Amino acid sequence: MSDPQVSFLLERVLASGGYSVIKTQDWPSTQKELQSKSPAMIILSDKLGESNGLDVAAELAQRWPAIPLLLFVEEDTPELLKKALSVGVSDYLCLPLRAEDITNAVQRSLEKARQRREWVLLETRRNTASLQRKVDELEALARLGRSITGSLDLDSVLSAIVDAAVELTGAEEGSLLLLDESTGELYMRAARNFQDEFVRTFRLPVQDTLAGSVLRTGKPALLDEATPQKIKTAYLVHSLVYVPLQLHDRVFGVLGVDNRHERLPFKDRDVKLLSAFAEYAVIAIENARLYANTILERNKLETVLTQIQDGVIVLDLDQRILLVNHTAQLAFSLSDQPLAGKKLNEVFSQSEILELVDSAGKSLSNRQEITVDDGRIFSILVTPIPAIGLAITMHDITNLKKLDRIKSDFVSTVSHDLRSPLTAIMGYVELIERAGTVNDMQRDFIRRVHVNVTNITSLMDDLLNLSHIESGFDGSKDKIYLDQLVSYSADNFSKQFSDKNLKLVYEIPDAVPPLYANAIQLRQMLDNLLANAVKYTPSNGTVTIHMEVEQNQIIIQVRDSGIGIPPMDLPYIFDKFYRAGNVGNEVTGTGLGLAIVKSIVENHNGRIWVDSIVGQGSTFTVVLPLGQP
Ligand code: ATP
Ligand code: MG
């Protein structure tokens, strides 16, 4: 204010009206006060010494638009006032200055400013509310997303989706309809604000209904009618939105909200929102379907595993139990207590199992025989399963063992009983020539009888020998070096090896510990295995003798590159007189060799098995315990 008198007058009138006044004389101090005190209004003169009051007013109005500006003019020419209004001045004062005019002008300006502030506040609130609604929608979507990924309970997820759809669209009721493939009708899978009875009995044909047309076309439907429309017999609504539930071009349901009582129209925004919810519903339904399928498959597998006649035990990589099926539980008298998660050695104490599992994957021997409490005998086999652990399968061989016993007894009796008449025949055949002269032809016949009886006798000897071994007869055991025994036996076959040009490979470690065993029997065992390898390997092949020592047992393998054994013959080749189908009649043999080998191995508490591929060769593996002196 340049005029001190005007300035003084204004100050007095304002102070008496209860306003506090700050006076400034230059631009910097004006700016400072405006920033620190934020006054309710500014009064300035159009003449401000050097500078033009209107320019200053323009600057003030631009920088502090919320503070009303009152301009004092000495002369109120229309041009000046027009200019003043255009730069943003809210009112003006002019001479003569009367107290009443001043107070009125000030109050008018303050009132205008207050109104403007309120309007701004209201607008802001309205904008904030619409933002808040958007935030709510986003939160609801995020919440649904979480509940879908976090829950496998389809009912609760679908209810949550319908609830959210109703709440965020402000609808009166909402429902999720699914297509019943068997009847071709829609039924209500989830609902909000419908009567329970209505939901239960709801059935809607696809033909000639609005929901049905959404299902057929895959396009949303938006209805807004002054007179209520029928969406189902005797069911009228004013407005509704239906959106399709669609997966890979297949529409299988409809999500909808509607207003029955009031005519509140839905907008495009609601269609978009509902479509987003529909997508969630599709994901949830698909998830539930996949999950149910997985469970079904798992149950099937579990039923197979538990009902199967063979025993099955599955362990994880830490040797913790994953599964023990019914047969295995019965065999080891394990009650129905939960076993999953327990350590193998907390549940099983049988050394056969523990050792087998410990050496699984590291050892050539992966099977054992075990006699369980009720007397049954199982053959157990351990198989490593990558990334899971290992499986122990057990097969009941009690009956096979019994049959074997009966057969052995029979063979031993028969061969024993046949021996005496054979000796008699032999004796009388020798006596014939002493009893009188025989012609050449007769002598030839006698020779043939003699040869054949000798053959039969040696066969009987083999059989008796076998039953001796089987009955554990002649079990004297000595300290034996198996590597030496192997080389003696192999030397014995050197002629056959060179005749067929077979290569013999030794894979024998340096210091093989001694074994407590019956030397004659082990020699017989090696002879029989080598004889077979030579016999069943065509010329120019290879025979390998592999030996390794592991803990307190010794493992011997005789491998050949021969004709191999057909899978269907494999279970029987250790039986007496059994000869596999791949061997022609021209290859001589009685089929007793492997039966003898097996008896010897068992007599030494060992195990034997064969792995063979037709046309590639066979591997016979024998595991013998080192034994005690
Ligand atoms: P023998 O009593 O003279 O030994 P064999 O050799 O026929 O007669 P086993 O030694 O018991 O009888 O063998 C039984 C059958 O197993 C054989 O007839 C043959 O079919 C099969 N077999 C045994 N060893 C081998 C092998 N190394 N390669 C292929 N087949 C074999
Ligand atoms: Mg043989």
Image (cartoon, grey):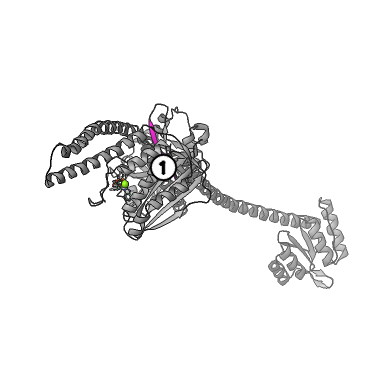
Circle 1 Cα neighbour tier, 10 Å, few/some/many (<14 / 14–19 / ≥20): many
Q: Is residue 507 left or right of residue 439?
A: right
Q: Nearer the viewer, residue 56 or 165?
A: 165
Residue 619, percent across and down?
A: 38, 50
Residue 423, percent across and down?
A: 23, 34
Q: Is residue 549 left or right of residue 540?
A: right
Q: Is residue 502 left or right of residue 15?
A: left
Can residue 575 be seen at all in this image of the molecule? Answer: yes
What is the total number of numbered labels drawn onto the structure image? 1
Residue 164, percent across and down?
A: 48, 44
For disc 1, does the CB lie below 8 Å from ligand 1? Answer: no
Instruction: Give the residues drawn in magenta, as a range.
Output: 373-383
Establish if 512 lies above or below 73. above
- Residue for badge 1: 522
Residue 382 magenta = yes
Main secondary-structure element of the magenta-colored stretch: strand
Q: Nearer the viewer, residue 362 or 505?
A: 505
- What residue appears at the point 84 percent right and 53 percent down from the top-left corner? 15
If the image is split into quadrants, where does the N terminus sit? bottom right
Can residue 186 be seen at all in this image of the molecule? Answer: no
Residue 145, percent across and down?
A: 50, 48
Q: Nearer the viewer, residue 560 or 177?
A: 560
What kind of element bears circle 1?
helix
Name the kind of residue labelled 1 in the image: Leu
Residue 78 figure quarter: bottom right
Residue 288 magenta = no
- What residue appears at the point 33 percent right and 37 percent down from the top-left corner? 466
